[in-house]
């Protein structure tokens, strides 16, 4: 296990941990909350492992004060959480639900009282079901409804929020939600996925404009799960082209409009047989390109691709097919190959060097853009020892290696301002239900008792010393 590089981080480096509303709150029918696409999806037989739902989750809605205690005891500088759109606006439109806003208002106050900065994400996947019924992210109107919702939250929470993040991982919302169907709302339509990509980009721009219309000096961001994609054979033109195509879909479909104000030509050409992109209207990509104070980067693993010859069976690691559709819209001749291990319980490879590479790429392509690691962490099959402790050396090792990798990017010039461990608590891991545990703190799903894992104790020390031991 390698944790002790002695690495220290720049003064003012922001240490935090992250969660998301549907994954922890529970209380799905309380406080005037309306149904979201994840309520519908998780209650549809066969969609989640063991049929798990977020109905109770970590019961954070009732235990938020206890959870704030853990955040304070960890010594975190910041806490990244999301507001649930269907708690704030139950049907996704119209006036705010007072009880929903009050919940987040109390949370923000509680954080500030404990000296912790609230880092707020407006959308971490729980779209109000009524909006999905009207077309969801394939409907342009959803982007405008998102801006209204963003304004309601900004008016309520105002300058108590340190950093406003519009969307979390729009890649997942678009491609898993509408392409592969592995996430809510479970649609499997490539053209729909690409229109969702665009309406999410538009929503990001409109949402940030709406926040700043109320709070002109609001610090704004978006969190992307940018992919590090490598060709199986770097000397093969075909494999390099496969990597380019996946990079366009996964990364540049978002960084193009959001950071450069245009979709990349190769993305439009690669997907021309799927859609004509006529849902992009003049001026949209300028709206998507709002000044960002920070780019949120979520990183877990890397991807390996090659050109598929259409004859050999696809690798088991391939993201195409099965009962589901493909998230890789229009890239039918690209094959995903399982990278070298070791792997986490998600089956994801552990490759800290990919994080250094990613941070340096963003630094090179978008100089002057500060970044924060808004999620990084690992699921492992934790066990509780007879004395009640949870020894999770693999999680400690994973986080330590990724912190060192972050430090190496900083050494080479990347402007990385903070790190948020995913996740504060074990929680509802989407289609994997409660089976995969990412928390620094264990949640017993029978009693809802919280127990610090070794990684929580270790992370508290990292935060206190501003670096690795
Ligand atoms: O749990 C998720 C989170 O909601 C978004 N980023 C990845 C995490 C692990 O899968």
Image (spheres, rainbow, N blue to C red):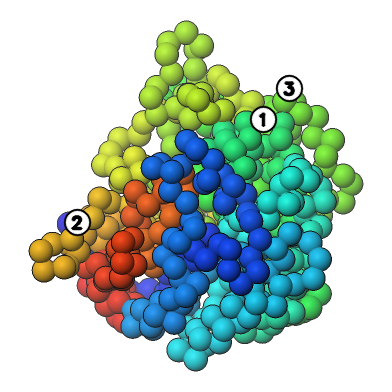
Q: CA distance from mark 3 to mark 1?
A: 13 Å
Q: Earlier in the sequence, mark 1 or mark 2?
A: 1
Q: Nearer the viewer, residue 393 or 155?
A: 155
Q: Nearer the viewer, residue 333 or 242?
A: 333
Residue 30 visible at all: yes
Q: Which mark is residue 273?
A: 3
Instruction: Report the residue marked by disc 2.
Output: 383
Secondary structure beneath dot 2 equals: loop
Q: Earlier in the sequence, mark 3 or mark 1?
A: 1
- Residue 194 located left or right of residue 353: right
Residue 290 placed where, x, y %? 74, 62
- Check the image and report above or below for 92 versus 50: below
Q: CA distance from mark 3 to mark 2?
A: 49 Å
Secondary structure beneath dot 3 equals: loop
Residue 223 placed where, x, y %? 57, 59
Q: Which mark is residue 189?
A: 1
Instruction: Say whether marks 3 and 1 touch (CB < 8 Å).
Output: no
Kindly give the residue lying farthest to the left in the view shown: 386
- Select label 3 or label 2 by which is in front: 2
Q: Which quarter of the rendered picture does the N terminus lie within?
A: bottom left
- Residue 239 located left or right of residue 205: left
Residue 440 visible at all: no
């Amino acid at each position: 296990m390698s944790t002790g590089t002695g690495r220290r981080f720049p003064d003012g480096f922001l240490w935090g941990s992250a969660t998301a509303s549907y994954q922890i709150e529970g209380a799905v029918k309380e406080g005037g909350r309306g149904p979201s696409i994840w309520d519908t999806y998780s209650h549809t037989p066969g969609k989640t492992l063991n049929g798990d739902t977020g109905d109770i989750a970590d019961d954070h809605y009732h235990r938020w004060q206890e959870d704030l205690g853990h955040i304070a005891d960890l010594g975190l500088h910041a806490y990244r959480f999301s507001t649930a759109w269907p708690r704030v606006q139950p049907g996704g439109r119209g006036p705010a639900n007072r009880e929903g806003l009050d919940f987040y208002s109390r949370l923000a106050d509680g954080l500030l009282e404990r000296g912790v900065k609230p880092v707020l994400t407006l959308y971490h996947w729980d779209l109000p079901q009524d909006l999905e019924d009207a077309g969801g992210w394939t409907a342009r109107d959803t982007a405008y409804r998102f801006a209204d919702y963003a304004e309601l939250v900004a008016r309520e929470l105002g300058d108590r929020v340190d950093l406003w993040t519009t969307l979390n991982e729009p890649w997942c919302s678009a491609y898993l939600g509408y392409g592969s169907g592995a996430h809510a709302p479970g649609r499997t339509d490539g053209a729909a996925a690409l229109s969702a990509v665009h309406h999410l980009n538009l929503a990001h721009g409109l949402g940030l404009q709406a926040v700043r219309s109320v709070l002109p000096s609001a610090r704004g961001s978006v969190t992307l799960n940018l992919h590090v994609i490598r060709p199986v054979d770097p000397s093969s033109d075909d494999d390099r082209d496969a990597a380019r195509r996946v990079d366009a879909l996964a990364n540049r479909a978002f960084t193009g409009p959001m950071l450069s104000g245009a979709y990349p030509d190769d993305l439009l050409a690669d997907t021309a047989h799927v859609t004509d992109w006529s849902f992009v209207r003049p001026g949209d990509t300028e709206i998507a390109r709002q000044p960002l104070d920070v780019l949120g980067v979520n990183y877990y693993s890397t991807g390996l691709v090659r050109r598929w010859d259409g004859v050999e069976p696809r690798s088991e690691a391939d993201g195409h097919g099965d009962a589901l559709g493909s998230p890789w819209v229009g890239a039918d001749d690209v094959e995903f190959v399982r990278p070298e291990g070791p792997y986490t319980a998600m089956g994801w490879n552990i490759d800290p060097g990919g994080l250094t590479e990613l941070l340096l790429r963003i630094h090179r392509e978008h100089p002057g853009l500060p970044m924060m690691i808004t999620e990084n962490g690992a699921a492992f099959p934790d066990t509780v020892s007879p004395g009640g402790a949870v020894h999770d050396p693999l999680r400690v090792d994973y986080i330590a290696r990724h912190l060192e990798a972050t430090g190496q990017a900083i050494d080479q010039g990347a402007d990385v301002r903070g790190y948020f461990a995913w996740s504060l608590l074990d929680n509802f891991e989407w289609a994997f239900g409660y089976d995969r545990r990412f928390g620094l703190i264990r949640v017993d799903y029978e009693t809802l008792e919280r127990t610090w894992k070794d990684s929580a104790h270790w992370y508290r020390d990292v935060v206190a010393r501003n670096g690795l031991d």
